[in-house]
Amino acid sequence: MNCKQFNKIPLEEVLLSLGHLPTKQSEKEAWFLNPFAKENHASFKINKNLNYWYLHSEGIGGKNVDFMRKYLNASVSEVLIWAEKQSFSSFHQHNISNQKLENLPANYEIIEIKNIQHPALLEYLKERKVENQTEFLKEIHYRMNDKNYFGIGFKNDSGGYEIRNKYSKICLGKKDISTIKNNSNSVRIFEGFFDFISFKDLENELEKEPADYIILNSVSMISNIKNSLGKYEKVELYFDNDEAGDRAVEIISNETKNVEDCRVLYLNFKDLNEYLNQQTNEVQEQYKPRFKR
């Protein structure tokens, strides 16, 4: 990875990998608490269009390389070595683009939306142990840059679709949260839709009654939901077991009552889907036919 490639990665994703979440954001900008020092008011701003940061409290700014040089107190070469070791989804995209496509421009066209039928998508769901949870999913065929693609689609509240397949992780249309309401006094919050459908697979086993569900579709969308949680008597959180998940739990717990961090369920796993995979493998192993020699 060179400087030009690293500077193209959305700085929001870089900050997220370091455990920093925005306190507020819009389509054009995002505000964070100072990543370099403790502060009570957000003074670190990202211009999303330019992918440029500015720290008002110190009067400094720059691009990704400049940020990480200060954050790590390191040279440019050391920053690039660090960046190479990260798993930035926007850098490891398939051949659609090298940039994170959360809000695609109007150069795409959705050709067909239908129930999931394609063998490759069914096999992908089977690999993730959620082949029975297709109620909330669609098969999306779309065209972009004169090429046809298809993937598993999960609709958000703005009419966009989170698209996933074995090689791609993008969003068609505007990035937004997804809400599923059951007129419940409880709400369960998930980072992504694979976490959500993994939970639905476990719901009966956990003896959980259906509730309202919020799927962030990106932990950076957390600022979009904070004001809507006060009406619930109970808020259950099912975030990843990483720094970003810790920060998300902290943000919601500080501003909302009756919050339960439910990650204890999958304490030794990265997320709910990884936990479900392990559970399923253990059951399959238990009931595997035994043959006498």
Image: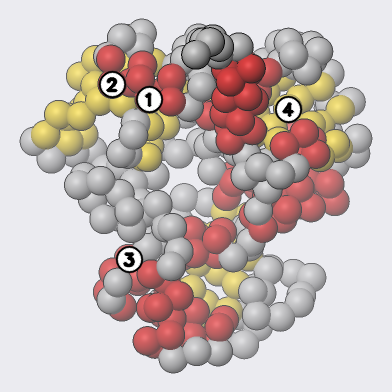
Residue linked to disc 2? 120
The answer to the question of whether label 2 and label 1 lie on touching residues, with beta carbons closer than 8 A, is yes
Residue linked to disc 3? 8
Residue 128 on image: x %, y %: 48, 27
Question: Which color mode does the image show?
Answer: secondary structure
Q: Secondary structure at mark 2?
A: helix
Question: Where, by quadrant of the figure, is residue 57 drawn?
Answer: bottom right
Residue 155 on image: x %, y %: 45, 23
Q: Measuring 79% from the left and 70% from the top, which residue is drawn there? A: 40
Question: Looking at the picture, which amino acid does disc 1 mark?
Answer: Tyr
Question: Looking at the picture, which amino acid does disc 2 mark?
Answer: Ala
The answer to the question of whether label 4 and label 1 lie on touching residues, with beta carbons closer than 8 A, is no
Residue linked to disc 1? 124
Whichever of labels 2 and 3 marks the residue nearer the N terminus, that label is: 3
Judge from the rendering whether residue 182 lies leftward or rightward of residue 115; answer left or right: right
**Residue at the limit of the structure toward the left, as seen here:** 146
- Give the Cα separation between the discs numbered 3 and 1: 29 Å
Q: Is residue 103 visible?
A: no
Q: Measuring 8% from the left and 36% from the top, which residue is drawn there? A: 146
Q: Measuring 66% from the left and 42% from the top, which residue is drawn there? A: 269
Tag nearer the camera, 3 or 1:
1
- Give the Cα separation between the discs numbered 2 and 3: 31 Å
Judge from the rendering whether residue 210 lies leftward or rightward of residue 68; answer left or right: right
Any mark on residue 188, and which? 4
Mark 1: few/some/many CA within 10 Å (<14, 14-19, 20+): some
